[in-house]
Amino acid sequence: MLHQNTDNINTSNEIFISFISAIKELKVSKILNTCGIRKLARRIDGEASAEKRTACEIFQFLLIMVFQGCNLHRFLGSKKQDIACSKSTYHRFLNDCHYNWRRFVTMLAANVVASIDRLTDNNRFKAFVLDDSVIGRKRSKRVELLSYVFDHVAGKSVKGFNLLTLGWTDGFSFIPVAFNMLSSAKASKRLNNINESIDKRTVGYRNRKTAIMRKPDAAIAMIREALDAGIFADYVLMDTWFTNEPFIKRLRDEGLDVIGMLKDNRQLYHYRNKLMNLRTLAAHHVRMVGDNNLLGSVVVRTHKCSIPVKLVFVRNRNKRNEYIIILSTDCALSDEEIVRRYSARWSIECCFKVCKSMLKLGKEFQPVNYDTTVSSTALVFTRFIILEWIRRKNSDYRTMGDLFFLIYEEVRDLELSDALEKLVSILAVGIAQGRIQVDEVIRAELLDWYISQPIFIQSLCQSQLFKGSLW
């Protein structure tokens, strides 16, 4: 038991040191000051000479709280409460309507993206990723701007907020650069409206007004904020909800190409001087026979705005007799490259999973005030950005200095062949050293799988290892 506690202490110290180093390197204190987050807070002593804490110190404390294994309430009731401020200090810090937390996340992301962009080639694929996720507040009643939002996972409307997120990716790292905690744009679906006592000149009031915007308008506003902050990309990756002609037209006006998935619905396209829907186009260009996952492609124009787009039909791996459709406004890309670049959209789903499961998104605080809803979300995204920055520094040797920058190649995407060869090598070495035990049933299954693979996969698996250590 003592040994386990010692390991936990060492791990906490390592996390604390890594975070403090990243905070200094990314100039978080300066960004906080720029965004108006500069309040001094006293420890509750009741004395005029009490020690003061800066906004950056309070922010650091809240930032690392998730790694302490307890929430703020439990920590302030523990033996370590002497190193903390009072609970009211932290709540006032999160509730302040003058702090621009959304701008803080964008500016911090701009610093990280600029550092990452320096490490990669100018020709490398860079893209914005746009998606939303429901933050449920099922038991809440009096939360400001609480509304009914549709949850696509549950298939029904739930009480909560719609977290609209814009991220940036280079295929290796993913950085959330902007967010908006959306309420419903329809007043009939909002359970509570804006608090009328809020000063209309403050950042908090502007956040409340943007929270009741329509989702496409909020998305365009976030993209403009990212571009104004110096975060640039060539494409916007998005799912079926956003991939429609009016929204594509607005993104093209911003100078961005689009790669998104389409629904097989009633959208019409010009092809050979005729208007066709997706099913008609698929009937002419999709070939379901064979094992090829790329079933065909066609270049068409949208119905009203006449935007040239390329439609790529890809076999649905869950239902092999069906297909999915990926749209790209960059018609010069090959079918394989369009699919490869669209696959980077999955990084935002991983971000949501990590934030909800491990960084306590929507769970750490249950505020009634909308300002705390925004600030707590900014806190979670800051943790994710710093963790992603630490991961990039630990995996990319070019971050170590100018000499390493010159002699090491930039990080590259992991090919399927390399991943398969590495996995098989780990399996073979583990069996040879006795760390992995394989019984006769598993041995037979592995042999059947190996025999059923094409010749190029068998060569990657190094058959001599199989015949030696495995068989």
Image: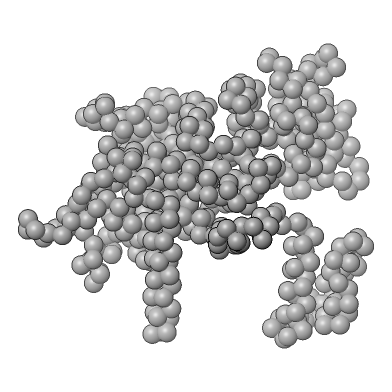
Compare residues 453 and 229 and report the one nearer the observer: 229
Q: Can residue 249 be seen in this view?
A: yes
Specify whether 82 is left or right of 365: left
Specify whether 210 is left or right of 291: left
Image location (x, y in percent) of residue 204: 31, 34
Image location (x, y in percent) of residue 5: 39, 79
- Image quadrant where one finds the C terminus: bottom right
Compare residues 267 and 462 and report the one nearer the observer: 462
Image location (x, y in percent) of residue 158: 45, 39
Quadrant of the image occupied by residue 297: top right
Compare residues 8 and 184 and report the one nearer the observer: 8
- Image quadrant where one finds the N terminus: bottom left
Q: Which residue occupies 40% across, 66% down?
A: 17
Q: In this view, does 249 lie above or below 94?
A: above
Q: Can residue 164 be seen in this view?
A: no
Image location (x, y in percent) of residue 167: 54, 42
Quadrant of the image occupied by residue 439: bottom right
Q: Is residue 33 above or below residue 244?
A: below
Q: Which residue occupies 36% across, 36% down?
A: 146
Q: Which residue occupies 12% across, 59% down?
A: 50
Specify whether 8 is left or right of 98: right
